[in-house]
Image: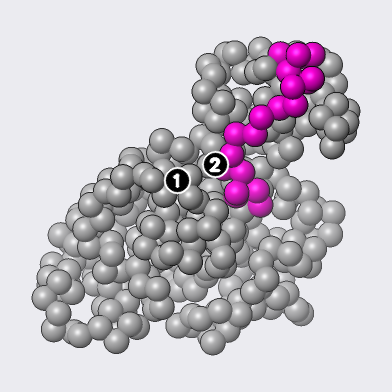
Amino acid sequence: MPLRLRFAEADLLRCRFAVSPLCETHEAVRTLLRPARHGYHQAWLGTEIPDLGPLRLLMPKFGYTPDFLGPPPAAPLGRTADFGDEIARLRATDPSLAHDEMRRSFASTGADPTDPHHQRLLDDPAEAIHALADATERAWHALVAPHWDRLRTVLEADIAQRSRRMAEGGLGALFADLHRDLRWDGGTLTLHAGSAMLDQELDGRGLLLMPSVFAWPEAISGFAPPWQPTVIYPALGMARAWETRPAPGSLTRLIGANRAALLTTLDEPASTTGLAQRHGLAASTVSAHLAVLRDAGLVTARRQGHEVLYHRTALGSALLGQ
């Protein structure tokens, strides 16, 4: 059944982007559990799988996943949420809310209500929150944290590109190619995918848009009140999160191996820290190389939130033969 998000006039002015390490952790867990998502992540799938505890019970392939597990982030516009803040927010979930959402999740899959594993979570929702938060922290440290700089680089580059598109053509241009299952028409955004909800009035709350490296091939929504309406969609360039492409040999001889490798990477905007993690270099070394490339007119720099993002110029692309 399609999910329709209906915009009022105020909602048109309250659409924003965010990056959530907590939500990306849960999408990484789903990717482990769903082979259909594995295609772009072969280089990552060798990661040792942590103890996921009760998370496995609440991430059904078909059905409702409790929203309290990954509440939309409250980080200010232009800022990436902090995992520590997000996990603290999860731990502070009202047990009665957790109970209701877990019960709804089990009911959505037709699960046996007398199953002892399910009943244990419902009988003591406060302890269930604790166990779920612990499992989420283990998943973060094992699956996402070691790669977070490169993942965040991809996510923030997506936001930069999508924001330019929205500035140039409005919401119609933004939603036109956000995901094949999304359609924008007359103030209504429709997600043509399975969902327990049919219609949701945004009522002035606006819409939060979150790119994900791990969500492909799906777009995900359905956050019910009291949560901020949100759509999670596959990030542009997600396949490049695991790539380290060699630079042409002639370019390496001309400007050096590290500068050539950095220039090759910068077909999407990236930060100094993200580039340092991807290439195994010190941030100070990357900063020095970027300064040289910028002085030569091969890259540009612009500030986004608390970071500076670098992007290859047309001259830089021409030097690469692209």
Instruction: Assign the N terminus to one quadrant of the image.
Output: bottom right
Figure check: 148 above or below 107: above
Q: Position of residue 55 (x, y in %)?
A: 28, 61
Figure check: 108 above or below 206: below
Q: Position of residue 92 (x, y in %)?
A: 28, 54
Q: Secondary structure at mark 2?
A: helix
* Side of 183 relative to 294 (left or right): left
Residue under the point 18% across and 74% down: 118
* Side of 301 relative to 19 (left or right): right
Foreground: 213 or 2? 213
Residue 239 inside the magenta-drawn segment: yes
Instruction: Assign the C terminus to one quadrant of the image.
Output: top right
Q: How is the image coloured?
A: one colour
Residue 209 inside the magenta-drawn segment: no
- Given the image, on which type of amino acid does mark 1 rest? Trp
User: Label 2: which residue?
Assistant: 242
Disc 1 versus disc 2: distance between alpha carbons?
A: 7 Å
User: Label 1: which residue?
Assistant: 44
Figure check: 255 above or below 231: above
Q: Which residues are magenta?
A: 236-256
Residue under the point 64% across and 78% down: 190
- How many residues crowd mark 1 within 10 Å: few (<14), some (14–19), many (20+)? some
Q: Position of residue 202 (x, y in %)?
A: 58, 73
Residue under the point 80% across and 63% down: 173
